[in-house]
Image (tube, rainbow, N blue to C red):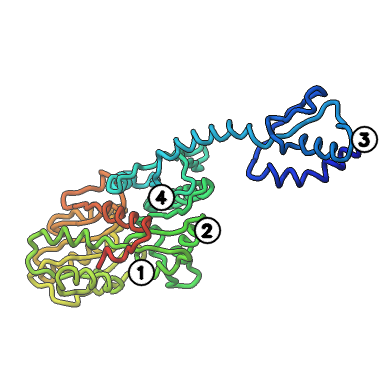
Amino acid sequence: MRRKAATLFQENSSELVSKRATGCGHLQFRQSTGADNNQEVLGHSGTLRGVIQETARRNGTAHPYDRITSFSFAGIVTGFLTAARAEQEKIQNDTRRLRLFTGTSNPALSREIAAYLGVPDGPRVCKRFADGELYVQIQESIRGCDVFLIQPTCAPVNDHLMELLIMVDACRRASARQVTAVVPYYGYARADRKTAGRESITAKLTANLLATSGVDRVLAMDLHSAQIQGYFDIPCDHIYGSPVLVDYLSDQDLGEVVVVSPDVGGVARARAFAKQMNDAPLAIIDKRRTGHNMAESLTVIGDVQDKTAILIDDMIDTGGTICAGARLLREKGARRVIACATHAVFSPPAAERLSVDGLFEQVVVTNSIPIPSDRVFSQLKVLSVANMLGEAIWRIHEESSVSSMFR
C-alpha cells in the first residue's frame, strides 16, 4: 500500500506544481492525524495531501497514512518578506551611488573635493600591523556603487601606491559597480621610456598594477608625459592643472610676459600654457643633464630681456632644474621670474633652493601633493585643484564629457 501511495505521489507532483506552487518560494510543514484526513490543509485544495486524497478516491483506495505530512507553499513567506521590506525601506533612504574614499596621502584635498560634490568622504579603516603590513576596510556598503578612490602616489611612493591597490581590492570584493582611481599625482611617471639598456619602464609597470588590481578607470592630472595615457589598458582621463595657474596669473599685474620651458621635453606643455596666456611668446632653456636630479642649464632660446619670465613645468622635485633656469633668465635680463608647476614634490633641498632671495618672485604650485610645514617658504603660493578634480569626478559619474572642461 505504501509503495502504491508513493507511486501516486510521484505521478501527481507535477500536477501540484502546475496548479498551486508557481511563484511561491517557501515550504510550510504540517502533520494531521486520522480525524483530520478529510479536512483541507490551510484551506488549500492544491496541497500535496489534497492531490493524493483526490487521486486515492478516484482509484477506490483508502488513504494509506495514519499520519501524513502536508505541504503548503504559502504562509511562511510573510515573515521573511516583512523583514526584507523593513531592510529595503532603510536602504532606500540612501539613494547615493557616488561614493568617495580617500587614502592617507592627501586627506585635505579629498575633503575639499567632497565639499565641492556635496558627498561625504566614506568611512574606512587604514592601519598597519606590527610588521608594517597595511590593512584597509571599507566601513559602509558600496554594493552597486560608483566608487572613486582619491590617492596621489607621492612620497612615500611605495606605501601610498600599495595602499591604493589594497583599497581597490577591498572595493572590488565589496561588489562596487565601478572603481575609479583618482591619482592627482602619478608616481613613477618619470621612467616612461628606456634611455639605457636594462632599465625598467616603471610608468607602464604602475599602470599594469592598477589595472590588475581591479581599477576600471584612472583619473590623472598632468602626467609627466602624455604618452603615459597609452600605457593603461583601461580608460584614462587626463586633466590639466594649467587653468588654475592661468586664472591666478591673469589677476596679477605681470606686464610683458614670456613663457619659458625649462627643457626641450617640456616645450609642448609651455606652448599650450603660452596660448592660454593670451598667446604669450615662448622661450626655451637648452639644458644638459649630468645625472639624476642634477641639471646644467646652458643657454636661452628666445627673448626674455625686460620681461616677466614664467617658468612652467609639471613638477618641482629637488628644484635643481628650475633654479638653474631662473638664474640663467636673470643673467639674460629677465625683469621678474615666476615658477609655476602642478606638483610640488619638493624633495630636499628644494625649499632652500627655491627660497633664495632675488631668484623667484613667486613659486606657484597646486595642492595635488600635500606640502609639509617645514617646506613652506615666503615666495610659495599654493592653489587648490579640488574643484577641477571634483568636476571631473562628477562628469565621469554622469558619463558626460571630461575634455570639454578645457575647451
User: Camera-side residue: 247 or 91?
Assistant: 91
Q: Which residue is mark 4?
A: 149
- The alpha-carbon separation of the residues under discs 4 and 2 comes to 16 Å
Q: Secondary structure at mark 4?
A: strand
Q: Which residue is mark 1?
A: 226
* Mark toward the start of the polypeptide (4 vs 1): 4
* Residue 316 place in picture, x, y as percent: 28, 59
* Mark toward the start of the polypeptide (4 vs 2): 4
Q: Secondary structure at mark 1?
A: helix
* Residue 7 place in picture, x, y as percent: 87, 42
Q: Amino acid at mark 3?
A: Met
Q: Amino acid at mark 1?
A: Ala
Q: Which residue is mark 3?
A: 1
Residue sitting at the far top: 35
How many C-alpha atoms fall within 10 Å of the one at disc 2: few (<14), some, or many (≥20)? few
- The alpha-carbon separation of the residues under discs 4 and 1 comes to 22 Å
The correct choice, above or below, for 46 with respect to 397 in the image is above
* Mark toward the start of the polypeptide (3 vs 4): 3
Q: Nearer the viewer, mark 1 or mark 3?
A: 3
User: Camera-side residue: 90 or 8?
Assistant: 8
Residue occupying image coordinates x 40% and y 38%: 93
- The alpha-carbon separation of the residues under discs 3 and 2 comes to 65 Å
- The alpha-carbon separation of the residues under discs 3 and 4 comes to 69 Å
* Residue 307 place in picture, x, y as percent: 9, 69
